[in-house]
Image: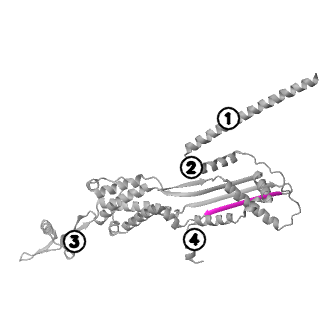
Amino acid sequence: MSFEDNMSFGNDRDNIENVYEKMIGNMPEELTQDKYYQYFYNLLETGNNYCSFFNTRLVKEVDEDWVNAIEEAMPSLQKVVMSPRKFIEEEREIVNIAMAKNFSPESIQHLLQHSNMIDKINDDGTVIPNRILNIFKEESLNTYENRFICTLILELQRFINKRFNVIFDNSKDERGTFFEMESLLDNYTETISYKLEIKIREKQTDVDNEEENMGIFNRISKIHRQINDLASSGFMVNMRKYPLVRHPIVKTNAIGKNLNYKACHKLWNYIHTYEYVGYRVDMVKQEPVVSKELERDIYNSFLWDYFMIRNYVEQTDTLNADREKRKKEITVKYIRQVLDEIVRGLDMSDANVRKLIMNELSDLQLRRKTELASARVVAQRKERAEKRKKKKKER
């Protein structure tokens, strides 16, 4: 089967329903009228049956709060990295005259104040020094604000990477369905034990999961990519030689007044107070009520297997399918099942359904009391009549 053939299958739910309808439709109507079928179906309905049916789903939900906080500050963080604060760093050093590169008025003034650094003075007034003050000036990134931004990027990278790896490694929602049935039948000539167990574990693909969580996953992927790009930027390369800062941050004029630095400071405080893992896992368990339709299909599956096996072995005992049918015991489970089917079939609000059931129950109880009272009156009259007859005979 080609990939295109697989893709043409469409929705799995629709396909399953389609196959199921075909299987049910192939059951001839005369089968349900067969006395042997009715005989065994009655045995199943009134027999000793155990059924367990539930569906579970492991749902992982991402907390969007930390994603919102990082997204809000990310433009400001990017602007600061692109245009960091700089200052002119000046380095003064006495060097050998042969090593001197820059001469400034300050160098000449320093030399006049330190005659010990002069070798000789020529007749023309030329001064020959042996050493001189060399002043180096260059732009530097070594500011508290830049070291704060550098530290924020590194801590934010750890913060995001840890959650990114956990969330995407465990992003699949696991589903599972479990069905188990055990039956013990006594059909007068034989005892039949039947057990059926089905476990279904759905392997949800990354594509399926991304369709359900596309929005939040795309946002997390975007900020993950952005912060890792910032961590490998030229700004961070230049800042490696400078020490990091510690929490809490000193609120300098720039951090307290500049909008971009204020946004970064807000994010710093947020990640240092965020104590959650960033996602939660919920186990959703459903226990569907076994409807009459499902019960019918289960019993038919049992009968199919029984008659299939019996067809391949010699039947020595003769079954009497004309026996009187057994009565089904009314249990709490049966009542709950009936109520569930009623509720599912009604297009009414919960309050109206509850009111309807309570009214009908009250009417039925009142009618039952009336019937019992009438039956007691009839029984009492009959008893009195029999007593009178007995007295007449004794006379």
Q: Quadrant of residue 182?
A: bottom right
- The CA distance from mark 2 to mark 4 is 33 Å
For disc 4, the neighbor class at 10 Å (few under 14, some 14 to 19, many from 20) is few
Point 86% across, 58% down: residue: 319
Residue farthest toward the top in the current orientation of the protein: 395
Instruction: Give the percent coordinates (x, y) of residue 247.
Output: 37, 54
| SS label for mark 2 | loop
- The CA distance from mark 1 to mark 4 is 56 Å
Q: Nearer the viewer, residue 325 or 45?
A: 325
Q: Nearer the viewer, mark 2 or mark 4?
A: 2
Q: Nearer the viewer, mark 1 or mark 4?
A: 1
The dot on residue 186 is none
The dot on residue 95 is 3
Residue under circle 2? 347
Residue under circle 1? 366
Per the rendered image, the range of residues in magenta is 191-201
Of the residues shown, which amino acid type is indicated by label 1? Answer: Leu
Of the residues shown, which amino acid type is indicated by label 2? Answer: Asp
Residue under circle 4? 9
Q: Quadrant of residue 17?
A: bottom right
In the rendered structure, which disc, 2 or 4, sits on the residue that comes first in sequence? 4
Task: Provide the major secondary structure of the magenta segment.
Answer: strand
Point 33% across, 60% down: residue: 149
Of the residues shown, which amino acid type is indicated by label 3? Answer: Val
In the rendered structure, which disc, 1 or 4, sits on the residue that comes first in sequence? 4
- The CA distance from mark 3 to mark 2 is 96 Å
In the rendered structure, which disc, 2 or 1, sits on the residue that comes first in sequence? 2
Determine if the magenta segment contains residue 199: yes
Residue 261 in the figure: left or right of residue 361: left
